[in-house]
Image (cartoon, rainbow, N blue to C red):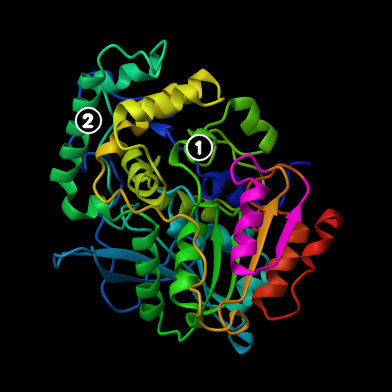
């Protein structure tokens, strides 16, 4: 498939659709020190506290009508702690034909929904920008919504990345102690939030966002890892979803090691998939000519930087099934039919999962409750996925489609991310579905 020329910001922000993990290894860790950096020490170019509880103008360069507010959400658990989510809204360009609010969420986890909304202002189909309020927000622990950053594992954990054999690691006790220390350091910095960074909490936050918008029902356009929280949300609140499109669908019903091993890719695989390397988080210094300078500046203003490892751990350790101890985890990775660099990288970064707070209740196969409302009266879903997507395989999208009895539009190629990336067939289907015209027939995917 040729590289599209139209979706400029979405292409530059392709990682917003990509569940790439272990970026800490790709981006490089500080060379000094044997432990994680102090929690919250990641540099950010802005104050993390969002705006007040009322909508106020927050124009960005070239986006004068942009509005912002904060949303207070419970951290969860037995305590009364709360945190603030940063929320933005770009009013529909054609108020007379306005349908409602379209809430966007990128993947990652750890990528900026505020950035996604800016990207949508350029890259999404005009019909969506005209007829919907475009809503973006930073997921808890991300960007301006109480960013979580615990640094990177060092010492005994870092040595797992170069172990000759994970099954025969000489001192599992030292690696396990280092994993426990990493989690404890993180817990001291972030308290109960650390156990509540998964997709259940994200779905709870999404309902708070809906209430803040004052909408009885919302429309959703969720990408990649955000589709996991989307599945949870539509099972809990089907009556609150007017229409939803899941683009690049993640199936959470699999072992954690199986999932994260396949989210690591080589430069050649990324090039073939037409997605930038994980380190390419910012707009290149020499952008394509069709990137308006003011939009590029607005996008840069909201860049939260590379997603920290703790956000991957907080989501993946909670959402998926993991072995109960480090020795079992290393043995499972050593037995995996995967490249050695993949298994060692996962061992280094995901050893803390065996001690992560909140693990033990994986999502499994999310599906509408048995005996619940008639599916025809619930959330109206459309799933879209590339046939050979190496990040969100079509087989997983098919399983999710069966559980939700939802149509699945498959598109030839390996592209991860279709809506906002210039795939005319997927974008036409998404527009038709979200604007309540008949959705594209999912059986004609080969014609895309």
The answer to if 5 sits in the magenta stretch is no
**In this rendering, does residue 235 appear at all?**
yes
At 48% from the left edge and 57% from the top edge, which residue is drawn?
Answer: 228
Measuring 34% from the left and 62% from the top, which residue is drawn there? 201
Decide: is 370 above or below 50. below
Q: What is the secondary structure assignment of the residue under circle 2?
A: loop
> Viewer-proximal residue, 319 or 17?
319
For residue 378, what is the image quadrant?
Answer: bottom right
Give me the residue at 84% from left, 54% from top: 446
Q: Nearer the viewer, residue 141 or 126?
A: 141
Upstream in sequence: badge 1 or badge 2:
2
The residue under label 1 is 258
Q: Decide: is 25 above or below 149.
A: above
| Residue 109 image point, x, y percent | 43, 49
Q: Crowding at label 1, few (<14), some or many (≥20) Cα neighbours within 10 Å?
A: some
Q: Which residues lie in the magenta part?
A: 389-412
Task: In the displayed orientation, state which residue is furthest to the front.
Answer: 371
The numbered dot on residue 36 is 2
Q: Residue furthest right?
A: 447
């Amino acid at each position: 498939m040729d590289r599209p020329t139209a979706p400029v910001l979405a292409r530059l922000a392709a990682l917003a659709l990509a569940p790439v993990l272990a970026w800490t290894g790709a981006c490089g860790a500080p060379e000094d020190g044997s432990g994680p950096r102090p929690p919250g020490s990641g540099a950010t170019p802005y104050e993390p506290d969002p705006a007040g509880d009322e909508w106020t103008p927050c124009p960005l360069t070239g986006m004068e009508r942009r509005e912002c507010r904060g949303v207070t959400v419970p951290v969860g658990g037995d305590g009364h702690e709360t945190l603030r989510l940063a929320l933005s809204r770009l009013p529909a360009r054609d108020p007379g034909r306005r349908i409602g609010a379209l809430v966007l969420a990128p993947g990652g986890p750890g990528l900026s929904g505020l950035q996604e909304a800016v990207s949508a202002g350029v890259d999404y189909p005009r019909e969506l920008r005209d007829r919907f309020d475009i809503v973006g927000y930073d997921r808890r622990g991300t960007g301006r919504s109480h960013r979580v950053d615990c640094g990177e594992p060092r010492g005994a954990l870092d040595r797992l990345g170069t172990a000759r054999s994970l099954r025969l690691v000489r001192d599992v006790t030292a690696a396990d102690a280092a994993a426990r220390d990493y989690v404890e350091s993180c817990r001291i910095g972030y308290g109960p939030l650390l156990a509540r960074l998964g997709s259940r909490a994200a779905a709870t936050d999404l309902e708070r966002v809906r209430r803040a918008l004052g909408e009885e029902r919302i429309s959703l356009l969720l990408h990649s890892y955000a589709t996991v929280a989307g599945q949870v949300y539509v099972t809990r609140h089907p009556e609150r979803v007017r229409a939803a499109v899941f683009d690049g669908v993640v199936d959470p019903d699999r072992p954690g090691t199986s999932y994260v091993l396949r989210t690591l890719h080589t430069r050649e695989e990324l090039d073939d998939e037409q997605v930038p390397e994980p380190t390419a988080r910012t707009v290149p210094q020499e952008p394509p000519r069709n990137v308006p300078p003011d939009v590029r500046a607005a996008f840069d203003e909201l860049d939260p930087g590379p997603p920290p490892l703790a956000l991957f751990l907080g989501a993946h350790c909670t959402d998926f099934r993991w072995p109960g101890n480090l020795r079992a985890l290393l043995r499972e990775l050593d037995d995996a039919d995967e490249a050695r660099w993949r298994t060692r990288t996962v061992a280094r970064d995901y050893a803390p999962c065996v001690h992560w707070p909140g693990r033990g209740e994986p999502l499994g196969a999310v599906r509408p409750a048995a005996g619940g409302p008639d599916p025809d009266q619930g959330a109206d879903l459309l799933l879209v996925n590339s046939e050979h997507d190496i990040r969100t395989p079509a087989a997983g999208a098919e399983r999710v489609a069966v559980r939700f009895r939802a149509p699945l539009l498959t598109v030839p190629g390996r592209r991860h991310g279709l809506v906002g990336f210039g795939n005319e067939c997927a974008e036409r289907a998404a527009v038709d579905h979200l604007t309540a015209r008949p959705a594209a027939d999912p059986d004609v995917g080969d014609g895309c």
